[in-house]
Amino acid sequence: NAGVTQTPKFQVLKTGQSMTLQCAQDMNHNSMYWYRQDPGMGLRLIYYSASEGTTDKGEVPNGYNVSRLNKREFSLRLESAAPSQTSVYFCASTQGVGQYFGPGTRLTVT
Amino acid sequence: AQSVTQLDSHVSVSEGTPVLLRCNYSSSYSPSLFWYVQHPNKGLQLLLKYTSAATLVKGINGFEAEFKKSETSFHLTKPSAHMSDAAEYFCVVSLNYGGSQGNLIFGKGTKLSVKP
């Protein structure tokens, strides 16, 4: 049981490049989430998917898109990366109360 | 609206002394509250959760938290700090209504340092 997995662990992009962060969970959870973590800010919700086939914006969705590919997978796409998107990105999932987090992706945009 | 405030951005204690990390919340509904811990360069781990059962909640690694509705507080405590407790701790409230049910609101975090 791997829990929540994320790829890649690290990524460096140039401004304007695009990339997709992958997330998968093997706990059969309905809900999945993408957060970004910046120093002194805690975690802020980017997008979430309450169930397969649905996605909704969180607190900071601008510059991102998501796809809930199936119940297991929830990807986050940066179409045109900006230095302000330098951050650590966490994926999480839940079936009820409390969320389980992946190990994170550290993204740097130069 | 729901929100959570961690009153200290940094707490420093000596090994073997008590730990107190303070958290106040604001919620229009009965809240679910959590404490998560993040060790350096790691993901987040759930320490404990309150979901309207017992007000004193015991978590992993000897931590516990008490839900006090009159004070809107959910402070995290541990009787005796260990070097391995050095980490960042997040107080979190869960949205309990509507389409966003289950979504979490994070505090800004408290960095705990433990001196030998």
Image (cartoon, rainbow, N blue to C red):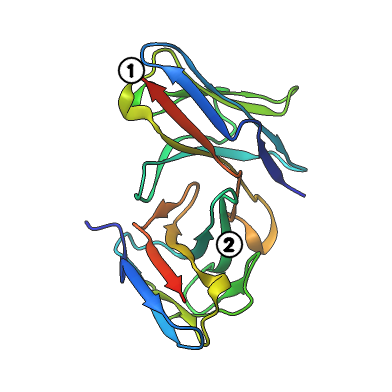
Residue A22 visible to an observer of this rendering: no
Query: Which of the chains bears the disc numbered 2?
Result: A
Quick one: A107 or A72, which is closer to the camera? A107
Q: CA distance from mark 1 to mark 2?
A: 36 Å
Q: Amino acid at mark 1?
A: Pro
Quick one: A109 or B21, which is closer to the camera? A109
* Element assignment for label 2: strand
- What residue is disc 1 on? B116
Residue A29 image offset from top left, x and y in percent: 40, 61
Crowd tier of the residue under label 2, counting other residues whose Cα lies within 10 Å: few below 14, some 14–19, many 20 or above: many
Residue A1 image offset from top left, x and y in percent: 21, 56
Task: Say above or below: A98 vs A74.
Answer: above
Quick one: A42 or B75, which is closer to the camera? A42
Quick one: A28 or B44, which is closer to the camera? B44
The residue positioned farthest toward the left in the image shown: A1
Q: Quadrant of the C terminus of chain B?
A: top left
- What residue is disc 2 on? A45
Q: Quadrant of residue B114?
A: top left
Looking at the image, residue B65 sits to the left or right of residue B43; the answer is right
Residue drawn at 68 percent across, 38 percent down = B5
* Element assignment for label 1: loop
Task: Say above or below: B81 vs B107.
Answer: above
Query: Which of the chains bears the disc numbered 1?
Result: B
State whether discs 1 and 2 lie on one chain. no
Q: Amino acid at mark 2?
A: Leu
Residue A15 visible to an observer of this rendering: yes
Q: Quadrant of residue B68?
A: top right
